[in-house]
Image (tube, coloured by chain):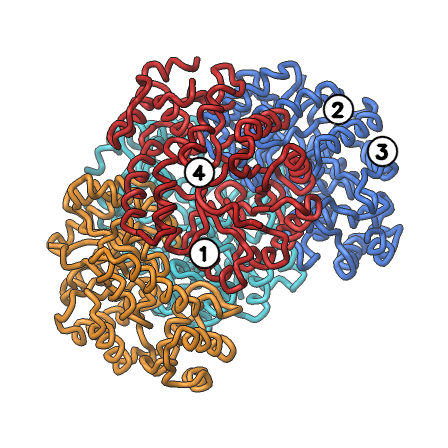
Chain colours: A blue, B red, C orange, D cyan
Amino acid sequence: MTEKFHGVIPPVVTPLTANGEVDVVSFERSLNRMIDAGVDGLFTLGSSGEVAFSTDKRRREIIENVMRIVDGRVPVLVGCIDTETNRVIEHAKEAKELGASAIVATAPFYALGGMAEVERHFRLIHEAVPDLPLFAYDIPVCVHTKLPGNLLVKLGKDGVLAGVKDSSNDDVSFRFLVDDNNKAGHPLTLLTGQEVVVDGAYMAGADGSVPGLANVEATGYVRMWKAAQAGDWATVKKEQDWLAALMRIVTVPSGVAGFGAGVGAFKTAMALLGVFDTNQMPDPVCPLKGENVEAVAGVLKEVGLTLAKNPQEVSNSTK
Amino acid sequence: MTEKFHGVIPPVVTPLTANGEVDVVSFERSLNRMIDAGVDGLFTLGSSGEVAFSTDKRRREIIENVMRIVDGRVPVLVGCIDTETNRVIEHAKEAKELGASAIVATAPFYALGGMAEVERHFRLIHEAVPDLPLFAYDIPVCVHTKLPGNLLVKLGKDGVLAGVKDSSNDDVSFRFLVDDNNKAGHPLTLLTGQEVVVDGAYMAGADGSVPGLANVEATGYVRMWKAAQAGDWATVKKEQDWLAALMRIVTVPSGVAGFGAGVGAFKTAMALLGVFDTNQMPDPVCPLKGENVEAVAGVLKEVGLTLAKNPQEVSNSTK
Amino acid sequence: MTEKFHGVIPPVVTPLTANGEVDVVSFERSLNRMIDAGVDGLFTLGSSGEVAFSTDKRRREIIENVMRIVDGRVPVLVGCIDTETNRVIEHAKEAKELGASAIVATAPFYALGGMAEVERHFRLIHEAVPDLPLFAYDIPVCVHTKLPGNLLVKLGKDGVLAGVKDSSNDDVSFRFLVDDNNKAGHPLTLLTGQEVVVDGAYMAGADGSVPGLANVEATGYVRMWKAAQAGDWATVKKEQDWLAALMRIVTVPSGVAGFGAGVGAFKTAMALLGVFDTNQMPDPVCPLKGENVEAVAGVLKEVGLTLAKNPQEVSNSTK
Amino acid sequence: MTEKFHGVIPPVVTPLTANGEVDVVSFERSLNRMIDAGVDGLFTLGSSGEVAFSTDKRRREIIENVMRIVDGRVPVLVGCIDTETNRVIEHAKEAKELGASAIVATAPFYALGGMAEVERHFRLIHEAVPDLPLFAYDIPVCVHTKLPGNLLVKLGKDGVLAGVKDSSNDDVSFRFLVDDNNKAGHPLTLLTGQEVVVDGAYMAGADGSVPGLANVEATGYVRMWKAAQAGDWATVKKEQDWLAALMRIVTVPSGVAGFGAGVGAFKTAMALLGVFDTNQMPDPVCPLKGENVEAVAGVLKEVGLTLAKNPQEVSNSTK
């Protein structure tokens, strides 16, 4: 049943107008472009989908747009990210009502606890929406808890979890998780959340990837996945090297860090490529401007992509 | 204007029924007991007020209950705790509508950023509810950002922040913050969120305290504050020593950590003292049971408090 | 027997010549000045005594100088700081041979382990030098392990540890440690390693303090300790407030952090006061220069101290 | 010149007798076995070579044994691991005198500082032994500083660093480091310190690997490196999968963590395979015993290795 979640499943970046509203036209352009590129699914309201910045109303608006635009062409995973169980369950029920193919939840955050609470958290979410596949989102950089492999496999065997999106940047643990999952009969679909070491994750046995950079360039990730499926590792390496060079858009901006640099660069690149109308960011983050936009444009050109807009236009797309 | 937020302002622990509903009768008993003890204000929906565990509907229910029960006898600060600016602003507007005397917000969490975003976050919240005093809640153990003293004082001087609730357990920084705030003309009301080193914070110049333990025993904190105001440090020390002995309720439970041990012990003590009907905890946290309840009872007796219920009854108060 | 380690026991800052050699003349001036001020002991080769920067030969040279200069006037504690047990034991044996009154050791660092190794580490050190009082140095910011109170008290009761130097900046744990130590019959001498919250530590029941700032100004700490012993908390507060104002020497330098700012400011202040000939720092750290020296001088003047040298002279005291 | 440091360069595990002395016979067996397997170099006194546990005398003894046994058959890198610059330089000079082919040093640790000190640290070490290739050892889990890629490449271009041993488990940064190094003309030899994601590091462009597990089984790593050189990624994957299965020896022990589990399992496996006479560990770490030895034996058998001793014999090899 979870077989359909294999392959390339980009976490959807949300386009905003200069006024901070959801930019529906850009959204259609971007989602259609990824589906046309051959992605296997889409993950909306992930960390890079600005879930943490969006009010509940905005989250609903984003899900509704994605469901309408995608229209069943690929499965849609929906991030139900919130501090603790009952808040997550509310999001999960809404995601279900709006037609999500699966949901994605992190460990609890903000309040302090232990692994007993983490385990009970996932069990209670699953009980609340038992027929909706539940992915655990392992993202310690945001939630400050690393999900242990043995807990994940146990929850997989118990039918609580359908899979894991691994954004832990702990590739050693990921390889052991793949191994443990295989020994347990492969109850979990294991997706890597990396962008530049997806090749290694595929060699380790990942069932797919959730690369934010695929919003900028999905075709490379699709080719890489197909090559990995075919055992053509030379092509996997070639595609990964090119995508890693493209990923430098997130390291060239200066004076900005974290989400502002990462998703800020994705949005800027997408604006430069003509996919998004603006590179607007959600409050309190400011969009990239001036030399930072030029630096992103420089990387795009260096890897051979053609700009639809010049940096000045993108800088002017927001106040 | 912020003068009224000096003194002892307990973060309100929320009583639940065995079914997990807000227990209104226990709530009235507890709030009245603290007001009768002479507290100077109440802070609802803080970390120990289970804000992170409560849905928006539940948060509203808690605020409404507190406002109704308190009925203007003391000022009420309301925690507007959420991941990023727009979500916090929604809570702030609701808090204002429900009659909050002031609001309390943390740095952004979950998404990664830098100090520029932290500063803009507080400015945008203040702009959204300009006439409501805004306290910064410095709690790095939950949000993984330490608020720098110079930023806090700057926001104080600019009229953005009315004060700080310091739960950083970094008493060196706190003393420097007091000093910087004094040099700037004391724009900020500085409250310590500690329980067992409040005496030191008062010596350092804190304007008050926000001790969760005051839900269990407010009279000691009230006496300590009055003694500090009078420069009677021997009494301050005596009261703090007694309260520190009482605080051992949070260190005696075994097999449980963080919120489950801390607020779990507070609720258990309040149930043993007859203030709360149960020691129920919000999902996914389990209430203390058996030997852990007995350990809490042992501490209460050791410091001379009289139990209204025996440990077995409290263990049986939840499933 | 450990009674003699109560009171003010400054961690000795090591003076260097411009060429980086031990400056014996300045050393005599500084140690005599602290002893004349009435300190109860001295702690050489602590973190601020540049133990981590000193070769074994240099460590020996420092101990020999301290023992010779002090000449039995006060007890001398010697830091035996190294990565793991056998390396620490070598230092301990040398400290014993050179006449140390007690030794101070941290938890193991660099290699990863658990509490079983920490406990065995202290037991093996004690076995190697059984007649030399052993203090545990709790400094997680350097060794990345927080020593648990119950382990410390257990090692105290077993005669392994004579005391604890607490530099954890975790005053909550420190208060509980004092409490546990008292309940166990006070096997441990508990010293706080703080500078600006010593008043709170004394209220909590500390047996003394180890403030690096006492190298700059010991008299205030001596007065504060005497006042604390007499229960004169108003004087304790007054002295602490003044010393906290003086401690701002470590926060005014810009462009430098950690040891370079902290000990760098101590040495600069001591040079400005005429105690040290230079403010030279051990490689790879650079001494404070120019505006940073002026900023330190500004603080000294602000709190009423008289400079013996002007900032330019101190800036010129090193290359 | 640094070309000779490419390929498989195991960090040498140090065999001890039951009494804790260096076990020279086992050492010869182990080093000869790795050289016969075709390793390209050896790295002695790395983290897994118990450098942190060894006195200076013991370090010298280890280096002398390694140099004598290796006798020029492969280059020998020597770890010069200590807290700060001058202590490292002493080790570096001794390593040079004893014939090291290159030295390996970490960022400073214990004392707190910033990147300016880190940079000056490496420059001063290089100045002290200018003709000895210097590798930076990036191991934040031990030294709590992550070496930034741009600093490393800058030091490479300036001739200060000859290469990097990357044990950061941050594969994203490693891929960017490879990229930056290539753009700068490949001044640095980049070695991954991983065991189970070496395949990904080779795809990313690593110049070699430093896998502790190669002490247990070097032939697989040699085959993997040759396959990577030949672009035969299917073989790379096959070998890595087998070695990852073998690496489970470090995850099966219970009740022990860090060095005790990791190097403890390596030594136990080597004793079971007849390479080491005992699985003795340096103080304060205890050797694996009983069920933990059986668990390691179980993994060895599962991956097809033949035991030379039974678990009971190995358990009895130490007190």
Can the viewer see residue D65 in this picture? no
Q: Chain of mark 2?
A: A
Percent x, y of residue C272: 39, 80
- Name the residue tied to disc 2: A75
Q: Residue at x 26, y 34 (%)?
A: D314
Real-space Cα separation, disc 3 to disc 2, in angstroms: 14 Å
Percent x, y of residue D216: 40, 40
Bin the neighbour count of mark 2 within 10 Å (Cα to Cα): few under 14, some 14-19, many 20 and up: many
- Name the residue tied to disc 4: B39
In this rendering, is residue A63 above or below C308? Answer: above
| Amino acid type, residue under disc 4 in the picture | Val
| Amino acid type, residue under disc 3 in the picture | Asn
Residues tagged 1 and 4 counted as in contact (Cβ below 8 A) = no
Real-space Cα separation, disc 1 to disc 3, in angstroms: 52 Å
Q: Quadrant of the C terminus of chain B?
A: top left
Real-space Cα separation, disc 1 to disc 2, in angstroms: 50 Å
Q: Chain of mark 4?
A: B
In this rendering, is residue C307 above or below B108? Answer: below
Residue nearer the viewer, B176 or B181: B181
Bin the neighbour count of mark 3 within 10 Å (Cα to Cα): few under 14, some 14-19, many 20 and up: some
- Name the residue tied to disc 1: B173
Q: Residue at x 49, y 31 (%)?
A: A148
D165 lies left or right of B299: right
Which tag is nearer the camera, tag 2 or tag 4? 4
Percent x, y of residue C170: 37, 48
Specify whether disc 1 shares its chain with disc 2: no
First in sequence: mark 3 vs mark 2:
3
Residues tagged 3 and 2 counted as in contact (Cβ below 8 A) = no
- Name the residue tied to disc 3: A32
